[in-house]
Image (cartoon, coloured by chain):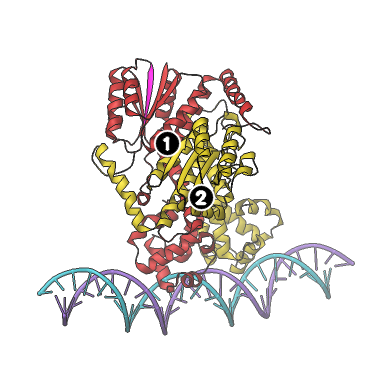
Chain colours: A red, B yellow, C cyan, D purple
Amino acid sequence: MNVLEKIVNSVNSFSKSERKVADVILANPQTTIHSSIAALAKMADVSEPTVNRFCRRLDTKGFPDFKLHLAQSLANGTPYVNRHVEEEDGPEAYTAKIFESTMAALDTARQRVDINTINRAVDVLTQAKKISFFGLGASASVAHDAQNKFFRFNVPVVCFDDIVMQRMSAINSAEGDVVVCISHTGRTKNLCDIAAIARENDATVIGVTAYDSPLAKECTLVLSLDVPEDTDMYMPMASRVAQLVLIDILATGFTLRRGTKFRENLKKVKDSLRGSRFDKKDFNN
Amino acid sequence: MNVLEKIVNSVNSFSKSERKVADVILANPQTTIHSSIAALAKMADVSEPTVNRFCRRLDTKGFPDFKLHLAQSLANGTPYVNRHVEEEDGPEAYTAKIFESTMAALDTARQRVDINTINRAVDVLTQAKKISFFGLGASASVAHDAQNKFFRFNVPVVCFDDIVMQRMSAINSAEGDVVVCISHTGRTKNLCDIAAIARENDATVIGVTAYDSPLAKECTLVLSLDVPEDTDMYMPMASRVAQLVLIDILATGFTLRRGTKFRENLKKVKDSLRGSRFDKKDFNN
DNA sequence: CGCGTTATGTAATTTAATTACAAGATATCT
DNA sequence: AGATATCTTGTAATTAAATTACATAACGCG
């Protein structure tokens, strides 16, 4: 694990003064690696030995060794760490934290996602007679987004964020149909029911949800992300971004599988939007 | 240029002893970063000042600084870059590329976003009598997501992805109302109209859109992201993720501005979801 | 071959980091 | 509540590391 993450993770096992050191380092990591122990101690308003003890607590040999590790962390591909937003944060602070936490979450997701399952999901999707995306609450917007993407592929795709519609749709599903159920926790009862109903009717059910959750058990294929979420905010943020990226990946896999001539079809859809736009370049939405 | 490359490049401009130092470092770079100047001098069979001079020749402040640079080189930072998906990419390749491109986009967005505007947007939102989120196409799901977030704050919030509804809503807006228009390009004619109508009716219009676009011109406040987009896929991907993160930031700023007691209210909303869930831990959607 | 220039090493100095210890704070138990 | 133990933290002393200043050696060139 890299030192930056380690600091963030063990932030509660720190003492008051160590905490001060951690804050200063996290706030200006670049400055830290070019500072002496004395300078850092002064910035954090603690004594030099405290800084030293802080370094040792993180399993480094001492301050110079700590700086080395820190330098590597910063240079590494994962400079982003999940940092919690705090009460007294100003706009710069929370903006930076949210961007960084999201990037950190995506990095984690990338490492944990199972490529084989993705590949199989793409397989199933490309052969689907009909694709349905179901989500509730925050996951509903992910489902909508998925619909927007797959709709461009000229395949029958529906999306419902209404339990009754979802239920009706699930009951009417048949072999060859693919149902994608999206839920961060995988514990939304209604959605579990939908998944079960769809499977009883021989549809293939793909779950974009937590590993080992009740919903996961109802699915044919589970794409789990297991992204750490900032519970302080009481809102799904990073997890939902990861879900969206996963959808992007499925959509991309889909187009690649369908080949070049299919891509031309995509371009046609995009061009069709041009009429609704003001001139200059071309682009979507 | 990283230090390792620099050593290799300037290997012929070195003196005999410096060359010895370079050889030792190139042979065991990992060892070097954990050695003292004395140890390295001994390994290279030169004096300590020679090592020091070697470091300075490479434009570092001295030996410790050189070790820092070397450590960073070794961490071989593959920072996130926007890598385009290609026809022949397999599942691992396109999965990695999409994750990385998205992270790169977020990184760009973070650097370009204007904190002042964010702060002002949060200001306006906290004082809003009513908040409306409008988007079309792919941006509609971003608008939905925003609604889902702000709805938890117990403020009057609406979201329409239908031009007619948007239009009616815009016409009925009044001073103190805030309208958020979301569009990647900012060239969707219908949305520009909506923004203009809302402003004519004294609403504050926040645009989450491209800088200097037709839509931007109609807005009171413009939050531009200017994220590079992979045009090959003909789908908005990274841009929409950046928009979502921006919404997260606005929502976070909102809750922070409203203070602690308000956060308890948020928790209440979250807890209310519990009944619809299977047990174990608690979380959203 | 001798002079000037550059390269290198030795020893002194300075700077930085660590250790040892003591005082203060905090928790725990009676 | 008070006393004792434990954990934190800081001050001062010590040690280690790096840098500088200077001297000597190697090398190139007329």
- First in sequence, mark 2 or 1: give its number: 2
Q: Nearer the viewer, residue A206 or B85?
A: A206
Q: Secondary structure at mark 1?
A: helix
Which residue matches tag 2?
A76
Residue found at x 43% / y 26%: A119
Asked if residue A104 is positioned above or below residue A89 in the image, the reply reads: above
Residue found at x 36% / y 58%: B260
Which residue matches tag 1?
A243
Q: Is residue A19 left or right of residue D7?
A: right
Residue found at x 45% / y 18%: A156
Chain of residue at mark 1: A
Quick check: is B182 in the magenta stretch? Answer: no
Q: Amino acid at mark 2?
A: Asn
Q: What's drawn in magenta, residue-wise? A: A175-181
- Residue B65 location, x and y as percent? 57, 63
Asked if residue B7 is positioned above or below residue A200 in the image, the reply reads: below
Q: Secondary structure at mark 2?
A: loop
